[in-house]
Image (cartoon, rainbow, N blue to C red):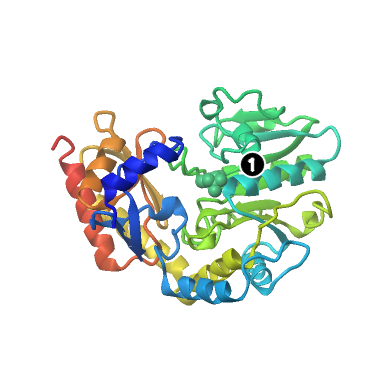
């Protein structure tokens, strides 16, 4: 079998270099472990860039569900439906705020659906969408329009009417709302933007403002759900409900599933012919989603996420690590802000070398987002590697 070098050299010839890939090819995964093509084992605190966030790699329950579905039916087209897509929608809406769902394959597509839904719901002349500095809503032209300018270079012009204000600044939001505003997109925790946590007051004030102005509140939970923060959905920390919620990444258990959930009030806005996605909700991916939601319930992963998050924070607090400027975390969504002298990217590479996968976010932040099912000994071993690297940043 080919090794890292051979596969990566070949990939350079045929894969567009939009990702800045690392020189490792992955061949196998099991829970919180993954192996590269040279046989090196890694503990994965960033499984599948979030896609395997619930149960890590190849959880037997998810694999079993996918295999069984693969033997029956892969796609049926959306003139029809199937049991897996119904079951997944039931699982999501029952744990969230009722309503109905639209399926696609990615976070960006889920946000595109949400943008269209918001515009249709708001009606003619209302097209402006407010989003937040340091947010991330995806790479398609709509999602990109909502995302900060640093991602937009060379792709302008963006959608008209996107307005950005500071995360947490309710007065700025209030000032930004006018007669043409259709809605507000917010991540209940900003992930890519540096693991930023809003206050309860801010999120509640956003909800109240949307009610007052009769505009829609969209929570982008592509990173924060399901169960990642110790609740099924992160908005549930704030005592509010959004009008629309978008999901992707972990909800598919490693297969591509994007979901746009509309509350009952807005559940029929996207009527026949208004939107679509050929393979959205195909039974294979939906079956993986159903198995993922069942695992969260069966294994009590919300509770486990909360407990493990507390454990990670306690471990970090017990160590004397001078290069950590701040630690922020809810459940298994933890961000370490490093001081200016220490590069988060360097730390990430050193961890990788020692067999631990972590990732960085904006503003010199390290992200720790292990699979929710991670075994205690693997979590501890991963933390040992991280602590050792952080204590010797110049080694
Ligand atoms: C990753 C992410 C997206 C984009 O998801 P894709 O599946 O890559 O299109 C959108 N919003 C948030 C909050 C994300 O973290």
Q: Does residue 93 appear to the left or right of 233 in the view shown?
A: right
Q: In x, y percent, where is residue 163?
A: 65, 29
Q: Nearer the viewer, residue 381 or 47?
A: 47
Secondary structure under tag 1 reads: strand
Residue 163 in the image: above or below residue 221:
above
* Left or right position of 193 against 112: left
Q: Residue at the spot x=70%, y=59% of the render?
A: 101
Q: Nearer the viewer, residue 187 or 55?
A: 55
Image quadrant containing the N terminus? bottom left
Task: Give the answer, above or below, for where 44 lies relative to 88.
Answer: above
In the rendered image, residue 25, in percent from the top left (x then y), is placed at: 33, 50
Could you tell me which residue is drawn at 56 percent across and 27 percent down? 152
| Callout 1 crowding tier (Cα within 10 Å): few <14, some 14–19, many ≥20 | many
Q: Quadrant of residue 203?
A: top right
Q: Which residue is mark 1?
A: 185
- Place residue 366 in its image quadrant: top left
- Residue shown at 69%/70% (left/top)? 86
Please tell me whether residue 174 is drawn above or below residue 367 in the rendered image.
above
Res. 360 in view = no
Question: Residue at 41% of width from left, 63% of height from top?
Answer: 305
Q: Is residue 111 visible?
A: yes
Residue 226 vertical position relative to residue 127 in the rendered view, above or below: below
x, y percent for residue 223: 50, 51
The image position of residue 92, as x and y in percent, is 62, 65
């Amino acid at each position: 079998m080919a090794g890292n070098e051979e596969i990566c050299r070949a990939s350079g010839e045929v894969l567009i270099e939009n990702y800045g890939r690392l020189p490792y090819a992955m061949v196998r995964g099991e829970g919180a472990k993954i192996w590269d093509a040279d046989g090196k084992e890694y503990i994965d605190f960033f499984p599948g860039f979030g896609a395997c966030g619930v149960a890590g790699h190849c959880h037997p329950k998810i694999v079993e569900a996918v295999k069984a579905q693969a033997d029956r039916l892969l796609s049926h087209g959306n003139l029809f439906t199937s049991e897996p897509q119904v079951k997944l929608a039931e699982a999501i809406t029952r744990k969230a705020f009722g309503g109905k769902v639209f399926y696609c394959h990615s976070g960006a597509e889920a946000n595109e659906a949400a943008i269209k839904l918001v515009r249709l719901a708001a009606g003619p002349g209302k097209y402006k969408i407010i989003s937040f500095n340091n947010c991330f809503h995806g790479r398609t032209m709509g999602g990109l329009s909502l995302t900060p300018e640093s991602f937009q270079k060379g792709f302008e012009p963006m959608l008209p009417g996107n307005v950005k204000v500071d995360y947490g600044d309710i007065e700025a939001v209030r000032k930004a709302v006018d007669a043409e505003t259709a809605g507000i997109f917010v991540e209940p925790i900003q992930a890519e933007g540096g693991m930023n946590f809003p206050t309860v007051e801010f999120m509640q004030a956003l909800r109240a403002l949307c009610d007052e102005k009769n505009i829609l509140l969209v929570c982008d939970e592509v990173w924060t759900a399901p169960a990642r923060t110790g609740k099924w959905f992160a908005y549930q920390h704030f005592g509010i409900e959004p009008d629309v919620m978008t999901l992707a990444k972990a909800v598919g258990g490693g297969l591509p599933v994007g979901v746009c959930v509309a509350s009952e009030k807005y559940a029929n806005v996207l009527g026949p012919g208004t939107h679509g996605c050929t393979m959205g909700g195909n039974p294979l991916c939906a079956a993986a989603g159903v198995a993922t939601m069942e695992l969260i319930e069966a294994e009590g992963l919300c509770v486990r996420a909360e407990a493990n998050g507390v454990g990670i924070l306690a471990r970090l607090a017990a160590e004397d690590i001078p290069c950590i400027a701040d630690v922020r975390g809810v459940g298994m969504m933890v961000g370490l802000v490093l001081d200016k002298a220490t590069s988060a990217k360097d730390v990430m590479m050193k961890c990788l070398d020692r067999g631990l996968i972590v990732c960085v976010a904006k503003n010199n932040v390290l992200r720790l987002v292990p699979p929710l099912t991670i075994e205690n000994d693997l979590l501890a071993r991963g933390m040992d590697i991280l602590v050792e690297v952080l204590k010797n940043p110049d080694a």
